[in-house]
Image (tube, helix red, strand yellow):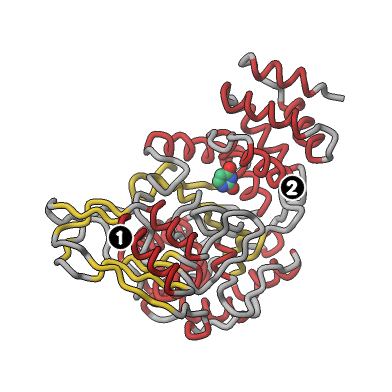
Amino acid sequence: MIRAAELIERKRDGRELGAEELRELVLEYTADRVPEYQMAAFLMAVYFKGLSSAETFALTDAMVASGDTIDLGGAIGRRCVDKHSTGGVGDKTSIAVGPIVAACGVPFGKMSGRGLGHTGGTLDKLEAIPGYRIELTTEEFVEQVREVGLAIIGQSANLVPADKRLYALRDVTATVDNISLIAASIMSKKLAGGADAIVLDVKVGDGAFMKTLEDARALAQTMLELGEHAGRQVVCLLTDMDQPLGAAVGNSLEIAEARDTVRGEGPPDFTELVLDACARLLSRSDLGIDEDEGRRRAEAAVGDGSALAVYERWIRAQGGDPDPTALPEAPVVKEVHAPRAGSVVRLGAIAVGMAALHLGAGRRTKEDAIDHSVGVLCHVKRGASVAAGDVLAEVHAGDEASGEEAVAAVLAAYELGDEPPREHPILLDVVS
Ligand code: URA
C-alpha cells in the first residue's frame, strides 16, 4: 500500500515521484481509498513544485487507466480524428468541423463536456437542438460514427473517472491553473476516447485559461508530448480568445452560427478557424493528402452542400431536428449601439461571456438550468470601424430587465478608439 503522506511530502520538497507511485495514488484515490484532503494537499504540492515530463506521462496514463477506453479506429477499421478546445467564449468549432470532415469521408467521433462559468460546453449547445440525444451507448456511438461518419456525445460516466474527481477537487482548491494538470486532464480524455489524430485548439487571451502566448505554447508542447508518447498524432493551434469567437455567444445562437458556417455563411474569423482545423485533421487522416489539399476539400464540402447534408444527417441520427427554425428563440431582442464613431480597439471576451451567463446561457453552479434561447450576437469585432449609432451587437434575452442589463454589460465590453481599422488574425501560432 502507498503512503499518501509520504508522496505528498516528497512532492512538497520538489522531488520526483515514480510512475508506479503516481499510478497507485490516482487509482487508490479514484477507489476512495485515499481521502480528498490528502489529494488536495498533493495537488497543491504539484501546483507549486510542478511535475517532470515523466511524471506528467505517468499521471496521464494512470488517469486513462482509471476507467474505460474506446478503440474507435479499431472498431471502425479507419483512422479516426477528433478535435478539442481548451475552452473559450463563443466556441462552437467542433459543431462545424465535424460535419465538414465527415463530408470529406473521414470519421469523426467526439466526446464532449459541459460548460461551467463564462465558457459554454459543446453538449449544452447541442442540447439547444430539440430532441438531440447526448447519451448514446458506446455501441451506438461507434455504430453512428461508422454509418453517418459523425457522432458527438457526452462523456460516458466511466471515461476517465479520475479526471471527474480530480477536476472537481482542483476547481475548489485553486489548483486548476497548472500546465501539467491541465494537459493530463485534457489528454487523458482524448486518449481514452480513442482518436488517432487530434487537433487541439489552445485558446489564448482574456477569455481563456492561458492568458499569454508563452503559457499557451508550454501547454501545447506538453499535450503534444503526451499524444506522441501514446502513439497519437497531435497538432496544436494557438488561437485568439481576446474577443469572442465568431459573432454568437449563447447556445441556440451558436448552433445557428455553426450551421451557417457549414453552408459557407459564417463569420470570417470562425470560418477561418473551422477550415484550418479541418485541413489539419484531413491531412492527418487516412486520406493520404497534405494540408493544402485538405483545405481545398473542406472548402469544396462547404461549397457543394455536402457538409450541410452531413450536418442534417448527424443531427437526425441523434434524434434532433436540424431545421434552424426549430431552435428556441428568445422573446426579447435588443440592439447595442455605438456611442461614438471610431474603431473597436477591445471587445472583452470574458465580459461578453459573463453577459451571456447572466442572461441564463450558462451555469454558475453545476445545478443551474440553462436557457438555450438567450445570448449575444457581436456583429462588430475588434479592428472594425463604426459610425456613431451603428449596431455593435444584439442581446437576446428572456425578459426586458435582463435584456437591459446585458445591453449595458455588452456596451462596456466594447472599447472604441481612433486607431486605423485593422485585421486581427484568429490563428496565432501552430505547435506540431
Ligand atoms: N479542460 C479540461 O478538460 N481540463 C482542465 O484541466 C482544463 C480545461
CA separation in Å, label 1 and label 2: 41 Å
Residue at numbered disc 2? 161
Q: Tell me if residue 213 comes above or below residue 294 in the rendering.
A: above
Q: Which residue is mark 1?
A: 411
* Residue extending furthest toward the right: 1
Mark 1 secondary-structure assignment: helix
Q: Are marks 1 and 2 in contact (CB under 8 Å)?
A: no
Q: Looking at numbered disc 1 in the image, what kind of residue is underneath it?
A: Leu
Residue nearest the viewer, comparing 374 with 301: 374
Q: Which of 175/109 is in front?
A: 175
Say if 203 sits above or below 13 in the image. below
Residue 11, position in %: x, y? 66, 19
Ligand 1: quadrant of the figure = top right
In the picture provided, is 74 more to the left or to the right than 30? left
Numbered mark located on residue 104 in the image:
none
Left or right: 306, with 52 as reference point: left
For the residue marked with disc 2, what is the amino acid? Answer: Pro
Question: Where is residue 319, by image quadrant?
Answer: bottom right
Residue closest to the eye, 148 or 362: 362
> In the rendered image, is residue 427 in sight?
yes
Query: Residue 5 occupies which quadrant of the picture?
Result: top right
- For disc 2, the neighbor class at 10 Å (few under 14, some 14 to 19, many from 20) is many
State the residue at coordinates (40%, 45%).
204
Count the labels in the image: 2
Name the image quarter holding the C terminus.
Answer: top left
**Of marks 1 and 2, which one's residue comes earlier in the chain?**
2
198 lies above or below 150:
above
**Which residue is found at the position 26% from the left and 64% from the top?**
380
| Mark 2 close to ligand 1, CB under 8 Å | no
Q: Give the SS element for disc 2.
A: helix
Q: Visible in this render: residue 237?
A: no
- Residue 202: x and y, percent? 45, 47
